[in-house]
Image (spheres, rainbow, N blue to C red):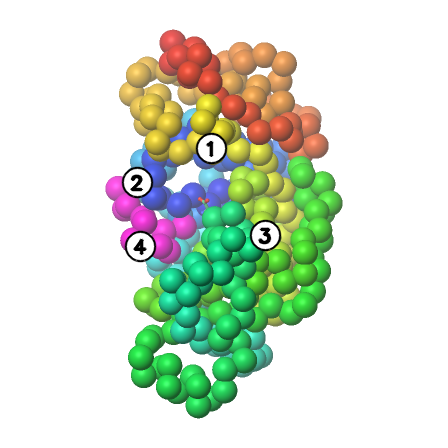
């Protein structure tokens, strides 16, 4: 049974880019008669805004994208909100610790930034971690421990990962891609990489479809699956919607949140039809229900080209 999920972070209002990913992952599941999970990724408490959780739920319902397990539905692998799953992440850390795959890192942000500018850092993080704290002796750790609470890093093996991506195609990552990464921050918060891996495995997710801004993080997750003897899901990374400034769509692009579209009286079928069109699933942006798109849905029909949303299109979308 195919199990897929949509895993939004409630740090900003759901916008058209998020809706595209929600629609495509819903279609992947519904076209295969599978189970669709909605998981709220609110692990970063500083960035999460609780009132947005309800807004995401309302947006999903408005679009007609229903879920089988998740908020309001429950399910066998809940809770479906990350802030309620912290002990599971701690258990996983214990296992990784026993396998000798973790080490404390005392580097300051300033020290890490001083190596920025190396050529192949993950775009969102700057340079790969140079491994400074990996080989510290017990004595060196003890000295640093007195001065600073450490973050916990996962020690990558010198291994090359290749993903058979359902949309992007085969993709190989350089060995040690991105460097040893943080699984628990110094302030006690578990990282996205750890939480997403533990949750996808625990929720028996077989197929992950998400934005291609997360393609770079896939080898880290594969390394965690491997270290924990868990079977990884199949991955598919869909191109994001870009704003005219060349950056991916975000709150700063203004009136593109679904709650705004909703408030203007735009019909959800218009949004679904437009998302299907820009994803390469239809020839024209005609109004559609999500269920109109399930028959014959294939991952390889999804356009691989990022789509740029112009002001003109934005205006057209708002004309009801
Ligand atoms: N929570 C992540 C986001 O909203 C998505 C995580 C994932 O799909 O792996 O960007």
Q: Earlier in the sequence, mark 1 or mark 4?
A: 4
Label 3 residue near ligand 1, CB within 8 Å: no
Does residue 19 appear anywhere in the picture? Answer: no
Counting the numbered discs, the total is 4
Report the span colored magenta. Answer: 41-51
Residue 39 shows in this picture? yes
Q: As rendered, which of 39 and 238 lies closer to the eye?
A: 238
Majority secondary structure of magenta residues:
loop
Label 4 – label 2 distance at C-alpha: 13 Å
Of the residues under marks 2 and 3, which one precedes in the sequence?
A: 2
For label 1, the residue is 247
Distance from disc 1 to disc 2, alpha carbons, whole Å, reads 23 Å
Check residue 119 in the rendering and tell me which mark sits there, or answer none: 3
Separation of disc 3 and disc 1 at Cα? 20 Å
Do callouts 3 and 1 mark residues in contact (Cβ within 8 Å)?
no
* Residue occupied by mark 4: 45
Q: CA distance from mark 3 to mark 4?
A: 31 Å
Which secondary structure lies at badge 4?
Answer: loop
Q: Earlier in the sequence, mark 3 or mark 4?
A: 4
Which of 106/232 is in front? 106
Q: Position of residue 49 (x, y in %)?
A: 28, 45
Q: Of the residues under marks 1 and 2, which one precedes in the sequence? A: 2
**Comes first in the chain, label 4 or label 2:** 4
Q: Secondary structure at mark 2?
A: helix
Residue 82 part of the magenta segment: no
Of pointers 3 and 1, the one earlier in the residue sequence? 3
Mark 2 and mark 3: span between their CA atoms?
Answer: 36 Å
Numbered badge on residue 28:
none
Distance (Cα) linking label 1 and label 4: 25 Å
Q: What residue is shown with label 2?
A: 52
Identify the element where label 1 is drawn: loop
Q: Which residue is found at the position 52% from the left and 18% from the top? A: 273
């Amino acid at each position: 049974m195919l199990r897929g999920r949509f895993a939004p972070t409630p740090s900003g209002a759901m916008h058209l880019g998020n809706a595209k990913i929600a629609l495509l992952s819903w279609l992947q599941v519904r076209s295969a008669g599978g189970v669709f999970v909605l998981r709220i990724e609110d692990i970063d408490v500083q960035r999460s805004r609780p009132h947005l959780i309800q807004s995401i739920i309302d947006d999903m319902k408005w679009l007609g994208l229903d879920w089988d397990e998740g908020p309001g539905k429950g399910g066998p692998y809940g809770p479906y909100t990350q802030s309620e799953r912290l002990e599971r992440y701690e258990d996983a850390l214990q296992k990784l610790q026993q396998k000798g795959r973790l080490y404390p890192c005392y580097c300051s942000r300033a020290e890490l930034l001083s190596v920025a500018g190396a050529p192949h850092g993950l775009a969102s993080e700057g340079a790969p971690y140079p491994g400074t704290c990996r080989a510290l002796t017990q004595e060196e750790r003890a000295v640093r421990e007195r001065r600073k609470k450490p973050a916990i890093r996962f020690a990558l093996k010198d291994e090359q990962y290749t993903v058979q991506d359902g949309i992007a195609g085969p993709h190989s990552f350089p060995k040690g891609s991105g460097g040893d990464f943080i699984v628990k921050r110094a302030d006690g918060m578990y990282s996205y990489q750890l939480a997403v891996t533990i949750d996808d495995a625990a929720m028996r997710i077989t197929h992950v479809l998400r934005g291609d801004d997360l393609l770079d993080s896939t080898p880290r997750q594969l390394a965690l699956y491997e270290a924990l003897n868990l079977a990884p899901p199949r991955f598919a990374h869909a191109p994001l919607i870009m704003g005219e400034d060349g950056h991916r769509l975000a709150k700063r692009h203004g009136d593109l949140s679904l709650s705004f579209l909703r408030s203007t009286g735009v019909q959800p079928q218009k949004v679904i039809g437009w998302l299907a069109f820009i994803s390469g699933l239809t020839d024209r942006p005609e109004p559609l229900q999500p269920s109109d798109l399930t028959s014959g849905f294939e991952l390889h029909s999804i356009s691989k080209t990022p789509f740029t949303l112009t002001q003109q299109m934005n205006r057209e979308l708002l004309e009801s």
